[in-house]
């Protein structure tokens, strides 16, 4: 229960950041290009993703945030297994040369190895643990 609550809280916080970005609020870095270099990292990125991609991420994260609280069953299991797979895969990408070539901008590349990748791995493992505990 505690892990499920923590997992949901983290996902809601990340969804909140994406919602701000979708509304054009460049927080915590006020310069759009600097924020894009920090959180997108794609080669020569100069702009943040637009509102539609940001809000699609918000919706997905909020669905995942409520998934531990859905009644036990096939839908809940499927959502949590897909979430675990996606987050574990994204976390591992932080350490793959192919991904480094696609996302070379600093400080994203450094933050990806230090923070984003490990956070994604932790979220993925949390989904596995919560799923196994239900």
Image: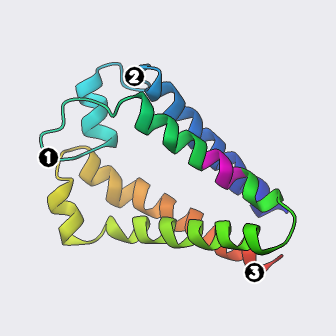
* Residue corresponding to mark 1: 43
The residue drawn where x is 42% and y is 28% is 51
Mark 2: give few (<14), some (14-19) or many (20+) Cα within 10 Å.
some
Q: Earlier in the sequence, mark 1 or mark 3?
A: 1
The quarter of the rendered structure image containing the N terminus is bottom right
**Helix, strand or loop at mark 1:** loop
Look at the picture and state if 62 lies above or below 120.
above
Q: Give residue 89's position: percent from left, percent from top.
A: 43, 71
Q: Give residue 68's position: percent from left, percent from top.
A: 77, 61
Q: Is residue 2 left or right of residue 26?
A: right
> Which span is picked out in magenta?
61-65
Q: Main secondary structure of the magenta part?
A: helix
Q: Give residue 96's position: percent from left, percent from top.
A: 25, 72
Q: Are marks 2 and 1 in contact (CB under 8 Å)?
A: no
Q: Earlier in the sequence, mark 2 or mark 1?
A: 2
The quarter of the rendered structure image containing the C terminus is bottom right
Q: CA distance from mark 2 to mark 3?
A: 38 Å
* Residue corresponding to mark 3: 132
Q: Give residue 113's position: percent from left, percent from top.
A: 33, 60
Q: Quadrant of residue 71?
A: bottom right
The residue drawn where x is 50% and y is 25% is 20
Q: Quadrant of residue 107?
A: top left
* Residue corresponding to mark 2: 26
Look at the picture and state if 32 lies above or below 99.
above
Look at the picture and state if 7 lies above or below 132.
above
Q: CA distance from mark 2 to mark 1?
A: 20 Å
């Amino acid at each position: 229960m505690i892990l499920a609550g923590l997992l949901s809280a983290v996902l809601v916080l990340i969804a909140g950041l994406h919602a701000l970005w979708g509304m054009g609020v460049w927080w915590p870095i006020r310069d759009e290009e600097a924020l894009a270099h920090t959180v997108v990292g794609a080669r020569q990125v100069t702009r943040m993703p637009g509102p539609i991609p940001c809000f699609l991420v918000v919706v997905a994260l909020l669905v995942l945030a409520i998934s531990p609280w859905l009644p036990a069953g096939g839908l809940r299991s499927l959502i949590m297994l897909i979430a675990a797979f996606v987050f574990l895969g994204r976390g591992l990408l932080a350490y793959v040369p192919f991904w480094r070539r696609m996302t070379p901008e600093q400080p994203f590349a450094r933050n990806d190895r230090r923070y984003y990748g490990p956070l994604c791995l932790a979220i993925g493992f949390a989904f596995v643990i919560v799923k196994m505990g239900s």
